[in-house]
Image: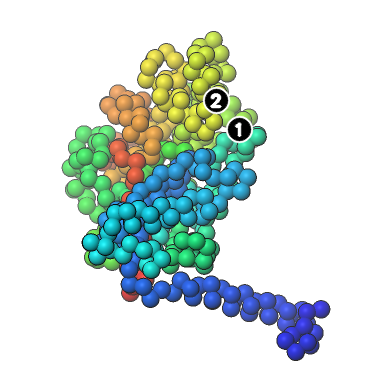
Amino acid sequence: MPKDMHGIPLAGAAVAMTAAAAAAVMTFFAHQKKTSTKDTYYLLAGDVGGTNTRLALYSPQGEELLVQHYRNAAVLDATAPSFEDQILIPFLTACQSDLRLKNHTSRSTNTDLSTCSIVACLACAGPVRHNAVRMTNMGDADDQKQPDMALDISGPDMEASTQGWLKTITRVKVINDFVAQGYGLLTLDHATETRELLPGSLQRMNMDPKGPKACVGAGTGLGECYLTTSTLLLPEQQVGYECYASEGGHVDYAPQSNLEVELWQFLKKKFNAPHRVSVERVVSGKGLANVYEFLSQRFPERIQPDIHQQFLQAGDMQGAVVGMNASQDETSLCHQAMQLMIRAYGSEVGNAAIKFIPTGGMYVSGGLTPKNISFIEGANSTFLKAYHDKGRVKTLLDTIPLFAVMVEDLGLRGAHVCAKQELKSMRK
């Protein structure tokens, strides 16, 4: 039986109280090391997706100092993935070297991270609970030799860590990746970084400057979010919008043709789903690969051997193989797969527009949008036909500004916005 400091046996309740007290003391001292008196703060923004991670460090003056991209499959240990050990600490090490190389002392910027503090915001693909997330949409779900990786990212754990350069991190805010996308929308230059999918969209948006906004974006997965005006944000930030997370990419996929019903049945069998399939299984990079796989089994006589071999060997980049070959031959399986995916994409964006009525702008983002804009824009495109195919309420969609986002760093921008907000809240 456990004993107290005088050697007297402790009862069960006392043991529990002692353990709780010890844990509280450990937590207190762990967080004390992050109670910094340093007056130099750097901001770290991260966009952690299923396929890629983008990290950026910003100076106290807001200057972007270093941006690095990581392909998760190349840097994460599939058997024991660690965001801190395999991505974040190497990035901070590179930042320290880069700061010294650039000699920012001439700009009154401290070049030694060990004498500064870092406030970070990490935008992660997954639902956030208690400032932490478990990411599961990573790796190749169909590769039995290398199943999906589960990556845990915890703000409190990083704040308490004294490992390597993590000791410089004072605050970590973990947010959903599409919350970051939403705040990133507020940084867009509409003239150079978006395309109007419906003529007059910018004019309609300016007619309702406080209207709600919504965003749907396909990348490795399918994300959605919405924004409304808020008085919670600081007036000097001049944002005026608060973004809310959504898992709308996991709503039901609704087939609309005989071939799509066959696709739906194929996906139910593939993913062992007895009753339903989420729209993300079709509308995403992985979804595009799923659609091609279905078509190759449904129409084996149309397979192009060289492209099919590339597809089979591409691992988690199968969707990219399909996308790169979709425009070359309109009779190919790749083109047909793209059209099926794009039709479902347009339909889901239309669904979101009906639900939120975003008179402040409906945005189509994600990596697949700028890469496949030729399938999306144009009055007769498959995307816009599906977008407008909403029966009795289709005329409502004519009143909603619709934009395609042509940049792929939206999540990183939004994480930077949130990191700045976090630093301001610390200084109150």
Amino acid type, mark 2: Gln
In the displayed image of the protein, which residue is found farthest to the bottom?
A: 6
> Where residue 159 sits in the image (x, y, percent)?
48, 65
Q: Residue at x 62, y 74 (%)?
A: 23
What mark, if any, has residue 142 been given in the picture?
A: 1
Q: Amino acid at mark 1?
A: Asp
Q: Is residue 21 left or right of residue 96?
A: right
Q: How far, Cα to Cα, is label 1 from label 2?
A: 13 Å
Looking at the picture, does residue 305 appear above or below residue 128? above
- Which element type, helix, strand or loop, lies under badge 1? loop
- Residue 403 visible (yes or no): yes
The x, y position of residue 334, in whole percent, is: 45, 20
Circle 2: is it few (<14), some (14-19), or many (20+) Cα within 10 Å? few
SS at mark 2? Answer: loop
Which quarter shows the C terminus? bottom left
The residue singled out by tag 2 in the image is 313
Q: Is residue 150 above or below residue 394?
A: below
Q: Which label sits in the foreground, 1 or 2?
A: 2
41 and 414: which one is in front? 41
> Residue sitting at 51 percent across and 23 percent down?
311
Residue at image position (47%, 40%) is 71
Counting from the top left corner in percent of width and height, residue 257 is at: 48, 23
Say which residue appears at 58% left-offset and 78% top-offset.
25
Residue 61 in the image, given as x and y percentages of width and height: 26, 61
Q: Is residue 83 above or below residue 349?
A: below
Nearer the observer, 404 or 229: 404
